[in-house]
Amino acid sequence: MELFSELYNCYYQIVDNILREAERLPVSEKTMLEECTRLGFAESSLYILPKLISGEWQLLSSDDRLHYRAVTNDHMTLPLTRLQRSWLKTLLKDKRFRLFFSDSQLSVLENYVRDAEALWEPEDFHCYDQYADGDCYTSPEYQKHFRTLLAAIPKRQYVTISYQSRKGRRITRHYLPLSLEYSAKNDQFRLLAVPENERHSIFIRIINLKGITGTKPLPRFDKEDFDLVSLIQKTYYKEPVRLLIKNQRNALERAMLHFANYKKKTKKIDENTWECLIYYNSSMETELLIEILSFGPAIQVTGPDSFLAQVKDRLQKQLQLFARETPVTPSRP
């Protein structure tokens, strides 16, 4: 997001990188130009380099076309503004946010923002169309399992996972954790993983963290390149969901944000209509259906037939439910 885009922005990052490089080795004008191009915009070097090379900013000293860092403070701290500290305190009130940090890290963060004022409270928001039996994010056992899997994913470390299946069976297997996903509809995290003996399978297991009863890291690591995105895409149906989006009440922007986690293609049909193709698999189907219906008449489903049938079936059930709940007003004699 762009809340703090003007603070420590890309110009700041460019200069910081150049100074770090100049501290290690003398840098040339060519090196600085490459850094400006890599981290900034086409015109960034036109503004930054003259001030660095001329010494106007007094950050570099020059010798025979090579430039050295003139600043001696090696541990320059970057203080946060009041708004940043308030934003951080607001995030700390989110139970899901806290899952990604250890208790000691959370203690440091809380102490740093203890006198800041939160921008809002969690109870200021009410989520519609969300199940009420979400994950218990404050449970010590849940936090332990979450952090074990979170640590194993980047290391590509195998983990022994015990969990309760949807049919009530207790399962314990060795898995390679691939990714953690959050479902806003269910208010739950789920793990994407591959069983150790099915490492080259295209079938990904989806395990709800709520059902996990035990996790134990194993002293084994996967050393092969593993493209999770390609693996998931192999499970997609051949035909994507086809949508027509009418740009009413800012529907296009809302849809692009709402479906940002799906692979999709969007093209303009006319001045006020866009076609969007969303690729999905069986594990995404129900949630995608509910998300599309939440847009009402702003989005029209044009295919495939199997998905259209589910849309019609769900709408008919909603009509029947509405008819049963609507009281009948007796007519006058």
Image (cartoon, helix red, strand yellow):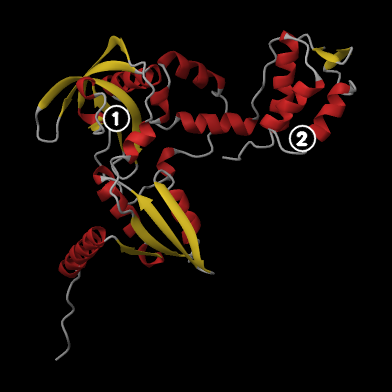
Does the rendering let one see residue 9?
no
- Residue to which mark 1 is pinned: 191
Q: Position of residue 45 (x, y in %)?
A: 79, 32
Residue positioned 74% across, 17% down in the render: 19
Ranked by sequence position, the earlier of labels 1 and 2 is 2
Q: Is residue 86 left or right of residue 286?
A: right
Amino acid on which disc 1 is placed: Leu
Work out whether residue 194 can be spotted.
yes
Marking on residue 301: none
Residue where numbered disc 2 is placed: 44
Please identify the quadrant where the N terminus is shown: top right
The picture places residue 319, in percent across and down from the top left corner, at: 21, 68
Mark 1, other Cα within 10 Å: few <14 / some 14–19 / many ≥20? many
The correct choice, above or below, for 324 with respect to 43 in the image is: below
Q: Which element is circle 2 on? A: helix
Image coordinates of residue 196 in percent, x first then y, are 23, 20
